[in-house]
Amino acid sequence: MLQRIQFWKLRVNSDHSASLTCERDEGNIALSQEISYTDFPLESVTLYLADEVLLLPSEY
């Protein structure tokens, strides 16, 4: 069961593949997905889901 606060992290590799993870707590991975191709412009991004509201890092 996922917690009330989830940490979603997208990390883009140099070959434009990526990995998406959802953590219950820092370092406790609940879900992960390998993505074969993305054109996402950043190397990584972390989003926070708290009480059904998705937050940017500056909002958490």
Image: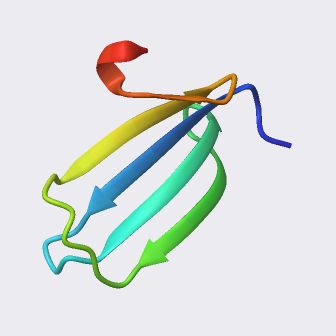
Residue 10 in which image quadrant: bottom left
Could you tell whether 45 is left or right of 39 in the image? right
Q: Residue at x 13, y 58 (%)?
A: 41
Residue drawn where x is 78% and y is 40% of the image: 2
State the residue at coordinates (31%, 57%): 11
Q: Quadrant of the C terminus?
A: top left
Task: Please tell me whether residue 3 is drawn above or below residue 35 in the rendered image.
Answer: above
Q: Is residue 22 left or right of residue 44?
A: right
The image quadrant where one finds the N terminus is: top right
Residue positioned 25% across, 49% down in the render: 44
Return the x and y of residue 15 as percentages of the image width and height. 16, 80
Q: Is residue 6 left or right of residue 9?
A: right
Choose between 34 and 38: the one closer to the eye.
38
Q: Looking at this view, name the residue that lies furthest to the right.
A: 1
In the rendered view, does 14 fall on the left or right side of 12? left
Q: Is residue 16 above or below residue 5?
A: below
Does residue 40 sit above or below 55 in this rendering? Answer: below
Q: Residue furthest bottom?
A: 36
Tally of marks:
0
Q: Splitting the image into 4 quarters, where does residue 55 fall?
A: top left
